[in-house]
Image (cartoon, helix red, strand yellow):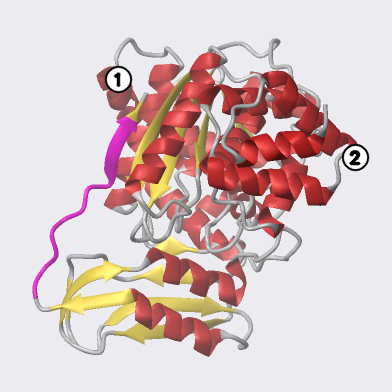
């Protein structure tokens, strides 16, 4: 079997067998296939796509490229939740505690911020002392005790995906739907999950800009799960405006605390409850989705989800008091108000611009190696549909260093669209797949 022949066939949109895909994955992971050949293969996939059989074969081979996290000793149905990345998307920190409080076992394998989108691990690590590098044994023990633990992907879990992702980032093939699907699902399947709830973002603040592409990605991931005998559901949700009001790591932890005390933004609360309900339903805690929605709501209203997150923070080395006393979190030293140039209605807030501005002042990273400033970010004061006066505050920029603040402020100003008439209300959940 020759690598060049497989590149040639994929370039011509032919289907490769599971053995041929295994040869490519093993060869690249093991160092016998060089970067330049794998780059050519990834670009061939980018333009020619992959069949469902090929995507499943790629996912399985990447899953088995490293160690499997055995959760057989952990009781209950294991359900994770994954978002494809958005701006102000802190739903994992709300939905997971609600589901765990309802009785679901939730092994959360979370990611970091990249580009203009936030990452769950970075938000958690803005809590002083919080550890996300639990050993496999610690992870298992915490799941048995609390039914919820947050960790990152280790170099031992799906290492092929780590190598492929770095190369995709350097070869402009990140947006390939088959490669995104296999990357996400290989990490999830390596952790002994029984079920998975996916939040596939679409819009200017998401990696998927078109709903047809988001649907294809959702269908592909649900299909991979089914062929591997896992229960998977996907929501396609709007990311044309930031979710909630807070964008930035410690700022988002504050909003999580407010939301788990039933005092959060309506869009964030609504989506978090729906994701938690689907986790509860796939975890077979309730017989119907409607009962799961009622149970998720109960866990929010009686404070069970809030208490669960506090337990997890304490168990992973953080100070649970940060959810009550925000001064214990990293706080910015500077603030800049962005005001409305005229009266009217907020017709749109470009989520990508807000995410880019937040990242620019230190809340995000351009490469995986970049450091993050946990204190900085943006807090919106308005949402689309609201009426504003000339000079009223649209949002506040929180920073710790002066460089790039002017640039970020200009980007934030450009994110707001103001019109003379109120816009039509947009749906938050656009479709359900699976």
Can residue 434 be seen at all in this image of the molecule? yes
Q: From which residue to which does the magenta span run?
A: 421-432
Name the one closer to the observer, 330 or 361. Answer: 361
Name the one closer to the observer, 27 or 214. Answer: 27
Q: Mark 1 = which residue?
A: 289
- Mark closer to the observer (2, 1): 2
State yes or no: residue 141 in magenta: no
Dot 1 alpha-carbon crowd within 10 angstroms: few under 14, some 14 to 19, many 20 or more: some
| Picture disc at residue 31 | 2
Tell whether 300 sits left or right of 163: left
Tell whether 4 sits left or right of 323: right
Q: Which of the 4 image quadrants contains residue 123?
A: bottom right
Which structural element holds mark 1? Answer: helix
| Position of residue 309 measured from the top left corner of the image (x, y, whole percent) | 54, 39
Q: Residue furthest left?
A: 421
Sooner in the amino-acid sequence: mark 2 or mark 1: 2
The structure residue drawn at horizontal position 72% and vertical position 66%, both measured from the top left corner, is 371
| Position of residue 403 measured from the top left corner of the image (x, y, whole percent) | 62, 87
The structure residue drawn at horizontal position 29% and vertical position 36%, both measured from the top left corner, is 431
């Amino acid at each position: 079997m020759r690598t060049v022949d497989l590149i040639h066939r994929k370039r011509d949109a032919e289907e490769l067998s599971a053995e041929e895909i295994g040869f490519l994955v093993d060869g690249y992971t093991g160092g016998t296939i060089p970067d330049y050949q794998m780059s050519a293969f990834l670009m061939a996939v980018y333009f020619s796509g992959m069949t469902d059989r090929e995507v499943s074969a790629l996912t399985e081979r990447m899953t088995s490229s490293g160690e499997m996290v055995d959760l057989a000793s952990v009781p209950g149905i294991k359900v994770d939740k994954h978002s494809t990345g958005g701006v102000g998307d802190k739903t994992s920190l709300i939905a997971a505690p609600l589901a765990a409080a309802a009785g679901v076992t939730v092994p959360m394998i979370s990611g970091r911020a990249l580009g203009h989108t936030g990452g769950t691990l970075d938000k958690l690590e803005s809590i002083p002392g919080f550890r996300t590098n639990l050993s496999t044994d610690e992870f298992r023990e915490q799941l048995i005790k609390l039914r919820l633990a947050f960790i990152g992907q280790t170099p031992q879990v799906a290492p092929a995906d780590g190598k492929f992702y770095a190369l995709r980032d350097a070869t402009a093939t990140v947006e390939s739907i088959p490669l995104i699907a296999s990357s996400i699902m290989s990490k999830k399947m390596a952790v002994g999950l029984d079920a998975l709830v996916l939040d596939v973002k679409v819009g200017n603040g998401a990696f998927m800009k078109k709903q047809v592409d988001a649907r294809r990605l959702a269908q592909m991931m649900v299909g991979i799960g089914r062929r591997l005998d896992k229960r998977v559901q996907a929501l396609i949700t709007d990311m044309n405006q930031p979710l909630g009001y807070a964008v930035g790591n410690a700022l988002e932890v504050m909003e999580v605390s407010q939301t788990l005390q039933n005092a959060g933004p309506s869009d964030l609360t609504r989506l978090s409850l729906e994701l938690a309900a689907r986790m509860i339903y796939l975890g077979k805690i309730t017989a119907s989705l409607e009962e799961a929605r009622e149970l998720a709501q109960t866990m929010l209203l009686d404070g069970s989800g809030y208490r669960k997150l506090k337990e997890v923070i304490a168990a992973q080395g953080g100070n649970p008091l940060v959810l009550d006393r925000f001064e214990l979190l990293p706080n910015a030293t500077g603030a800049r108000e962005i005001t409305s140039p005229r009266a009217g209605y907020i017709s749109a807030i470009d989520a990508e611009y807000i995410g880019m501005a937040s990242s620019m002042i230190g809340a995000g990273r351009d490469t995986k190696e970049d450091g993050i400033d946990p204190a900085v970010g943006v807090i919106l004061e308005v949402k689309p549909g609201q009426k504003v006066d000339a000079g009223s505050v649209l949002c506040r920029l929180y920073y710790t260093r002066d460089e790039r603040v002017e640039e970020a402020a200009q980007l934030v100003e450009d994110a707001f669209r103001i019109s003379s008439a109120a816009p039509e209300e947009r749906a938050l959940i656009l479709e359900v797949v699976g």
